[in-house]
Image (spheres, rainbow, N blue to C red):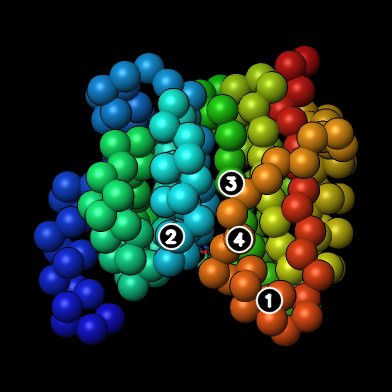
Amino acid sequence: MTSSQKLSLEKLLPLFGIAFSNETLDPQAIFGRVAPLVLEIGSGMGETTAEIARQNPAIDFIAIEVHGPGVGSLLKKIEALELKNLRLIRHDAVEVLERMIAEGSLAGIHLFFPDPWPKKRHHKRRLVQAPFAALAARKLAPGGYLHAATDWPEYATQIEQVFSSSTLFEKELQAQKSRPITKFERRGLGLGHPVRDLLFLRRKE
Ligand SMILES: C[S@@+](CC[C@H](N)C(=O)[O-])C[C@H]1O[C@@H](n2cnc3c(N)ncnc32)[C@H](O)[C@@H]1O
């Protein structure tokens, strides 16, 4: 990170960040209202995250990102756009889900272009595997959605298999959730990568 990126991060994180904690967070206290809550995992530089929040003022969003420059970039966007419905946690997303998110409390989870880990020996590092689907199922409200996108065809197949083989999810075939293009996606499209969006709904049981 450059020193100016560091400075803005130190200034803005206390304003728009939520500190990682082992306590379940209280969205009503954070946002000052009762509203559907959507979590984004790996918001990157945050352009799409901020734009989605701007377009959906009735929904509250929490972005999770570990990468310092990305965190700083999204914090600046929250400030510039005066977004009251978007906050950010700088921490590992799995730990945040496990510790900070109440069971059955999420209206949705966004997972846009998770790291593909293309080398076979690194596949075990991929986020979307059966334990992640089980965790997401616990945290989503019945009828809540998981919207994933990737430009790595083989990872798209893995995501599809993981969620299709969970009895807790059903694939949403009809509605295609639209979303603004992401920074990582733009790069992938430039390289000719095919982008796939996948949408799964948490079964109501
Ligand atoms: C390939 S980038 C995509 C970023 C953004 N969604 C986009 O489409 O431009 C994946 C991002 O996920 C973040 N990430 C990966 N694993 C994470 C984890 N366990 N917790 C939080 N962020 C994570 C990385 O730091 C990176 O910024």
Q: Which of marks 4 and 1 is in front?
A: 4
Viewer-nearest of discs 1 and 3:
1
Write down the residue under mark 3.
110
Confirm if mark 1 falls within 8 A of ligand 1: no
Given the image, on which type of amino acid does mark 3 rest?
His
State left or right for residue 127 relative to residue 93: right
Disc 2 designates what residue?
46
Q: Please name the amino acid that badge 1 sits on.
A: Gly
Q: Are marks 1 and 2 in contact (CB under 8 Å)?
A: no
Q: Position of residue 52 (x, y in %)?
A: 50, 45
Q: Give the residue at x 59% y 54%.
A: 180
Q: Do the residues labelled 1 and 3 touch (CB within 8 Å)?
A: no
Q: Can residue 174 be seen in this view?
A: yes
Crowdedness of circle 1 by 10 Å Cα count: few (<14), some, many (20+)? some
- Name the residue carrying label 4: 181
Q: Residues within 10 Å of mark 3 (few under 14, many from 20)?
A: many
Where in the figure is residue 92, as x and y percent of width and height?
44, 56
Query: Sequence-wise, which precedes: disc 1 or disc 2?
Result: 2
Disc 3, ligand 1: is the CB inside 8 Å? no
Q: Which label sits in the foreground, 3 or 4?
A: 4
Q: Which of the pair 152/176 is nearer the observer?
A: 176
Q: Mark 1 points at which residue?
A: 188
Distance from label 2 to label 3 (Cα)?
A: 12 Å
Query: Residue at the location (70% across, 41% down)?
Result: 177
Q: Earlier in the sequence, mark 4 or mark 2?
A: 2
Amino acid type of disc 2? Gly
Badge 2 residue CB within 8 Å of ligand 1: yes
**The disc labelled 4 sits on which kind of residue?**
Ile
Q: Distance between the residues labelled 3 and 4?
A: 13 Å
